[in-house]
Image (cartoon, rainbow, N blue to C red):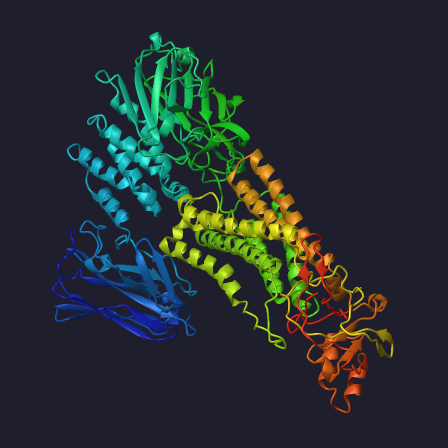
Amino acid sequence: AGAPELHTHHLIPSLRQVVFQGDRLPFQCTATYLDNSTQIRWYHNREPVEEDERMGVIVEESLIHDCTFITSELILSNIHVSANGEWECAVSTSQGNVSKKVEIVVLETSASYCPAERVTNNRGDFRWPRTLAGITAYQPCLQYPFAAGPAGAGSAMEKQAWRRCDRAGRWEEGDYSHCLYTNDITRVLYTFVLMPINASNALTLAHQLRVYTAEAANFSDMVDVLYVAQMIEKFIGYVDQIKQLTDVIVEMASNIMLVDDHILWMSQKEEKACTSIVRSLEKIAAHTLGSNSQHMAVNSRNIAFEAYVVKPESYVGLSCVAFQRRDVGPGGRPLQAERGGSEVLPDQQLRLRCTTGRPNVSLTSFHIKNSIALASIQLPPSLFASPVSAAPLADCKLQLLVFRNGKLFCSTGNSSRLADDGKRRSVATPVIYAGTYGCGVGNLSEPVAVSLRHPGEGADPVAAYWNFEVLGGMGGWSAEGCQLAAREPNVTSLHCRHLSNVAVLMELSGFPSEARGAVEVLHPAMYTCTAVLLLCLFTTIITYIINHGTILIPRKGWHMLLNLCFHIAMTAAVFAGGITLTGYLIVCQAVGIILHYSSLSTLLWMAVKARVLYKEVTWKAPRQPDGDASQAAPRPMLRFYLIAGGIPLIICGITAAVNIHNYHDNNPYCWLVWRPSLGAFYVPVAFILLITWIYFLCAGLSLQCRPSCRKDVSEPLEPPPPRLGGAGDLLTDSGSISVTLNSGPPCPEADGVYSLRVQFWALVATHALYVALWTFGAMAVSQRWYLNIVFSCLYGITAVVLGLFIFIHHCVRRRDVLNSWFSCCPSYRNALPMQAYVHPGLAPEDGSQVFIGCDPEAAHSGASSSSSPSSAGSAGGRCKLTNLQVAQSQVDTRPTPCPELDATDGRATGTGRHASNLHGRRNHRGRTKQCR
């Protein structure tokens, strides 16, 4: 009998109660009294409740009111944590039983809480509030559920997701099943799963589903694969009635092979979705072939299917080749030769061609024009010679499948004892399958011969077949019964003693173009040599920054040298550390932008330095009226920074703003895509190189034909004897020193150590080494195998040569730099000859001071305070000070121009050449150089 309909049945309280431990809570249950059989019983979590005063459970006797109602009371006088759960008032009558329930949540005195948490999944974005332990929280769904939602759920529950906070204050897994998927594709696929399928609508639904699987490369959720696998499994039951379903099923499975590897792996781990798809494909021949259909073939992008009805007594062997069309460019040149179909175009379908007998099949010399063979299989004539059963053989159904890769064969368990050796090896070839139905085939007396193409020479190859039974039914690659037979370039042959899915597994490291991980390392020589280059460059940079005031280099030269070294170091460091970070999109794009900027900026700093050098070589003193010694103000360095730093910044900014994916975009390295790089890099580089080489050519010709005014000396610490404008000796405390202070038109700022000719050839060498370094680095990451190693070694050699050249030329061979390095060493300082410094701020007629054996800074302070009575004392502590009284008759103060140049020997002519024999350390910022 069903539950009786009672006129009255109340439970007080009727809603969920949240109480604290130790509280008192009474229950009262009232129901209609039918007859003497009417009774009320209490249950807690479906267990009968017995009175226990010690535990605080008191059950009052039932009371009958006017033979109309029956009432029972339950009192929890001292609630314990064990009182959690459902309390039920059950009314039993002769006509049946009926009950009402209420939930009790008992909180401890020191109740804990589950923290607020945000959960984002394929059902939506849920923000769970801070919740008391033991409470179940509910959140509304973002969308309304389908009408055909889970059965037995009320309309209120269907709109909510719930999650329980356990007694320890930890969130349990939530239930989001009543909410819709947020992804449109997933939501549509879910509707397909809910639809009923029959013979009348199966083909229509299959065509509709195929349209959605065409975008399988965009699947972002494993449930997408799960739903498609479930639909394929349902469609297989109708292929015997609807032959056209076979084409649609094969194409859907082919599309699923476009899904990301990790999503396929998760779907296999969750519900063996990949195994379900492969198993469904293997059943096609058993359902479709028959007396009216002796042969069936289906071609698709990633799967080729072929099936025959075979008579065992007339079987003489079968050979099949899987191939695809080449993408042929102008002139018949294949654009995808020898790549194993790694980049599949939409019209490049995988095809099977089978012939009877045992013809000689070679993948390397495939006879079909403009086609490339990917796999072949030869089934021996003795295939049916040793059947498992002795019964007469009926017609057999022979099926062949070729998968372009092994994406549907995901090993999810511990496969350390299998052929892949704990995923150290991976499928490197197509997977080919052969199977029979309707007749038993045991161990073969002759092996099945298989040849498979792979894109490169991998490491440690192993022949294996897919065993569905291992790893708890998850499947894995097993090498039992299969062995390698022969190896050719890009082709491996093997023999197997059973029919199954067969492939060749190799180490991933052997496939840099196909199995590239998130980080690929360069040749070790590139890292080591780049470190040497960076050490030399940063040593030079730090030296010139710390000893800025004591190195005899002009202001322009100082700025240009530091910027050139910094940008070369930036290019080399970012190249070695980030050129292969293709697995991290944002990082890879940043690496491409920095390399783009630093490469252009380095070349522009070289061009700027070449222009400055050309200007110095071709400099001529301006004509000035007699007595006019005014000098033009120096031009700011900002213009050089705007050219060498601003132009690359503008180019990189425009390139990234147009399309940030111009950097990387599936390149095997972090650099510009080919077409955008033409206008954004290679054309500007060609223009910069052209301008730089023109300056080099003009400066070189000027040095050959018209040597510049000699503004430098070969040994700065051992000056040549001076030529004075007036006769006379100036005596000091330390001996006789001849001094001539003259003012005239200044020559351009020049290096105090190297001549213009040395500077020119040093810049040419640096330029050539940098261009070679960049070229060898680009070739090292773009070429493969032995060319990769060759260019990596050339890059390393060039990096070391460039670093040592800059360090030796700008540091080791400069006496002023060595003086700065060893200035703290007393023995080195005492061994140096006595140096003299003349403060340039005083006119000769005012009386000049010569500071011997002291720093220019000390001299400057002493000169500036010479008017003070204590100046001699203050300066005397640091250096020796001598006042020189220079007579007006002994010094010729007329301006003296730079000497005229003799084109025959490059020497200065005339008697107007004046120089100071006091050549020591100086501050190049404030120094006005005189013509030498």
Q: In this orientation, which residue lies closer to the viewer: 251 or 277?
A: 251
Residue 390, x across and y down, in percent: 38, 11
Residue 326 visible at all: no
Quadrant housing residue 615: bottom right
| Vertical comparison of 674 with 589: above or below | above
Where residue 747 appears, x then y in whole percent? 64, 66
- Residue 859 or residue 795, whichever sits in front: 859
Name the residue furthest bottom: 869
Taking the spot 33% from the left edge, 11% from the top edge, the residue there is 393
Task: Left or right? Give the position of 914 relative to 88.
Answer: right
The quadrant holding residue 873 is bottom right
Relative to residue 906, is residue 18 drawn left or right?
Answer: left
Image quadrant holding the C terminus, namely bottom right
- Of 139 and 263, nearer the camera is 263
Residue, far top: 314
Q: Please provide percent x and percent y for residue 837.
A: 76, 74
Locate residue 163, reporting x and y percent: 34, 60
Q: From this view, report whether residue 162 is shown above or below residue 467.
A: below
Residue beneath the point at 47% across and 13% down: 445
Decide which of 658, 717 is in the foreground and name it. 717
Task: Specify whether 294 is left or right of 115.
Answer: left
Relative to 410, residue 804 above or below: below
Identify the residue at image location x=34%, y=47%. Answer: 221
Residue 800 visible, this angle: yes
On the picture, is 446 further left or further right than 91? Answer: right
Could you tell me how many numbered marks the image carries? 0
